[in-house]
Amino acid sequence: MSINEEWWGAASSRFGQLIDDEPSELSRYSMDAWPLQAKRRRAGAIPASPAAVFRPRETQDVAELVIWAQDHEVPLVAHGAGSSVTGAAIPGDGTIVVDVSRMNRILGFDAKSGHVHVEGGVLGGDLEQYLSERGRTTWFSPQSLLRSTVGGWIATAATGQFSSRFGDISELVSKLTVVLASGEVVQLGSSPRGAVGPDMANIMIGSEGAFGIVTEAWLRTYPAEPLTGLIAYGLPSVEVGLGAVREIMMSGVRPALVRLYDADEASTLAVPQPPPPAVLLMGFVGPPVVAAAERSFVQQLLETAEGTDLGDAAVAQWMAGRYDFSSIEKLLDSEGGYAETIEVAGTWDQIPAIYRAMKDELRPIVDDVFGHFSHAYVDGISLYLIVRGRVATDENAVDVLERVWSCAMETALETGAVISHHHGIGQARAAYLERDLGPGAMRLLTALKRALDPTTLFHPGSLVPAEAEDLAQC
């Protein structure tokens, strides 16, 4: 009897119907939503397969599995809805996938603090439906809202579409319940904030399952108010548009919606065609008098920048289709069709050169490359690139997408961009992580992994490469 059979017999005896090793079930956990992996599979590559899937009902189930897995030296990989587009949720051979989708309860809501207490497997759409019935919202709205989980947002340090006003996942999270590699269940974080040593909850945000399994979260919420004062302006250039957004953010005005499109992507919007060199979409939220004042200030600034009012049709179009992946999915599911999304970020002084360099380097590789800026800050902004096209075969498409990733990451590093703004690292960016962080920060990350997970129980190779993990344990 093989070692695998030995531990499977012990696991099935211990956990019963919570654990499953049916091949048809395991196959769907061998991938997430990473386009490159999808094309590799269509081209005939056989992905790694987990040995089993474990579906806990509550935090204690996870803790018991962790203790058992330590005893049997079986690695664990947390899985939410499988919507990562960077390969962050792909397990290795012989692992147990911990699918938290059954842990989808909303455990409580406190109207006074606005905190909602949820399990990690709650889908974003279900959470927003629950909150809307109580007149609240998180204003956290990633494009994957309907197919991603709260635990996934935390694991990948996600950002929602209204982050320019409401911030990223770290500002949404108040507290977390986490199962550590020892099996201990701990609660991390404090509200409204604390100066009691480092913010321990933030160590888990963006850790991609490498430090522990997040099973519960307390999230901040806001009164549910409509997005108002929707505007679209054409601008003389991308650089002028970036300058206008910079002035807005530095003024203290905080539009909820900020999306600046280049002409290539603006050709897909409900604006006059051919489109202006840049199109800026904005929307506001808050007390009507405040939202109206912010809109008026922004309009004056954009008119000074020689902007042209294009009405609000493009914003309404974006709102109606902002969760729609279908065009990319159809392209990926066709012979030779390819598509990818890559998001980076840079400071205001860097971002024009980052944008021009990435467009110039990617354009010769693909049929189309679109660019927009969609998360603005006082000191900089994110750049979101979409590439797509068609070649003769899926094998050719794999080659194109591998070149796209290499080219995009090298160009980002050369121009000083942050290599990921909100999709995380996963397998797509793993080779470039140390160059982005620097050797000192990489040593610190490795030391954290060693301290929190000394036997590499959680997601081997995630964030910290396997060879670095081995070195850390010598």
Image (cartoon, rainbow, N blue to C red):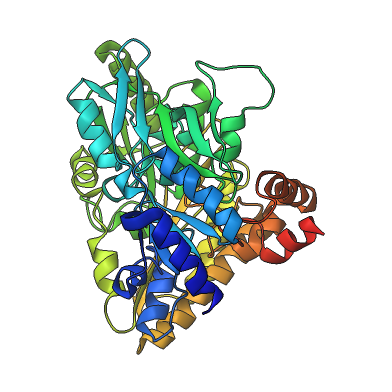
Q: Position of residue 60 (x, y in %)?
A: 44, 39
Q: Residue at x 48, y 82 (%)?
A: 399
Nearer to me, 24 or 32: 24
Q: Position of residue 377 (x, y in %)?
A: 51, 33
Q: Is residue 346 above or below residue 282?
A: below
Does the image show residue 291? yes
User: For residue 340, what is the image quadrant?
Assistant: bottom left
Relative height, residue 464 to residue 153 (above, below): below
The answer, for residue 458, to whether it is visible in the render is no
The residue that appears at 21% across and 37% down in the rendered structure is 311
Measured from the top left, where is residue 370 in percent x and y?
39, 61
Image quarter for residue 334?
bottom left
Q: Vertical placement of 294 versus 49: above or below?
A: above
Quadrant of the image containing the C terminus = bottom right
State the residue in front, 372 or 52.
52
Q: Is residue 158 left or right of residue 234?
A: right
Q: Give left or right: position of 10 versus 287.
A: right
View extreme (right): residue: 474
Which residue occupies the foreground of this view, 300 or 404? Answer: 404
At x 53%, y 28%, the residue is 187
Q: Is residue 235 left or right of residue 399?
A: left
Residue at point 55%, 45% (across, down): 212
Number of disc labels? 0
Which residue is most to the bottom?
392
Q: Is residue 234 above or below residue 174?
A: below
Q: Position of residue 154 (x, y in %)?
A: 47, 41
